[in-house]
Amino acid sequence: MPVTGKDAMEPGFAASEIDTTTPHPARMYDALLGGRDNYRADQEAVRRVLKAAPEARDSARANRAFLQRAVRFLVGEAGIRQIIDIGTGIPTAGNVHQVAGEVAPDTRVVYVDNDPIVHVHANALLTGGGTTSIVLADLREPEAILGHPKTRALIDFGQPVGLLLVAILHFITEAENPAHILAALRDALPEGSYLVLSHATADLRPDAAQSAAEVYDGATSSVTLRGKAQVEALFDGWELIDPGVVQVPLWRPEGCKPRPKELEKAWVYGGVGRLTG
């Protein structure tokens, strides 16, 4: 996977800072989804995750499907025309701007990720006539995301925004104060904005989930698994819309109701909240 072009990197970052020997969650997620934009270290880490919890691949796919349904809801039913997707990961088919564009081609999307390799791939692959951009930044520094020139160029903070925190907050430890991060993001958005959030859990098979999570201790970010009540608490200040926080296959499924076996393999909670002021 080449990294080329003097403009491929965000100012302040150099290609030499890219570490392909340490697993990165974005690249591990790509490997779980069957992508090819990952390295041997990521692939080996995923093999260890799947050995501990074979359900991890099903969970990743269920989470991806939830993301796409939630984006269709935002752009279709809720009328959102600008989205900030934090922790976007490696661009793949069915990404946020593509799903949104099928409903409203003028939807503007700012992608945010802390992996320079994601930044390089996004710069190369994301095209949308000036409606998409990629910011190299970390969720742990929300003010840097909100104030970034690329964010400000595409997002009008006087109009409702769709904020996506999909499969990212479990990489934030309690010591890193996820409530503070969420409050900083929430308080920057106007009434009528929406939060789409999903989060890995150990509620279904605690021992296996914890063993899988421990693999991430050797990656660039560890995993903090949270229960349903803890995930619901992350929506503080947001009004949850029906059906609330549920296993992701149960969030407004399209077509057939999820089968019990499908739910057994979906170790992710998700929900959508509206900012009512």
Image: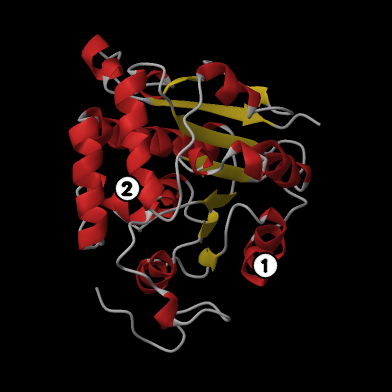
The color scheme shown is: secondary structure
Element type at marker 2?
Answer: helix
Q: Is residue 3 above or below residue 232?
A: below
Q: Residue furthest bottom?
A: 6
How far apart marks 1 and 2 lie (CA) works out to 26 Å
Which of the pair 188/24 is nearer the observer? 24
Element type at marker 1?
Answer: loop
Residue 29 tag number: 2
Provide residue 202's location: percent of width, then percent of height: 40, 23
The amino acid at mark 1 is His
Whether residue 244 appears in this view of the structure is: no
Crowding at dot 2, Cα within 10 Å, few <14 / some 14-19 / many 20+, comes out as: many
Provide residue 66's location: percent of width, then percent of height: 39, 32
Residue drawn where x is 53% and y is 51% of the image: 86
Residue drawn where x is 18% and y is 44% of the image: 47
Provide residue 242's location: percent of width, then percent of height: 55, 16
Which corner quadrant holds the C terminus? top right
The amino acid at mark 2 is Tyr
Q: Is residue 162 above or below residue 69?
A: below
Residue 262 tag number: none
Q: Which picture quadrant has residue 154?
A: bottom right
Name the N-terminal-most of marks 1 and 2: 2
Q: Is residue 167 above or below residue 34?
A: above
Which corner quadrant holds the N terminus? bottom left
* Residue underneath mark 1: 148
Residue drawn where x is 51% and y is 36% of the image: 76
Whether residue 19 appears in this view of the structure is: yes
Is disc 1 in contact with disc 2, using a CB cutoff of under 8 Å? no
In the picture provided, is 153 more to the left or to the right than 35? Answer: right
Which of the pair 43/95 is nearer the observer? 43
Q: Residue furthest top?
A: 260
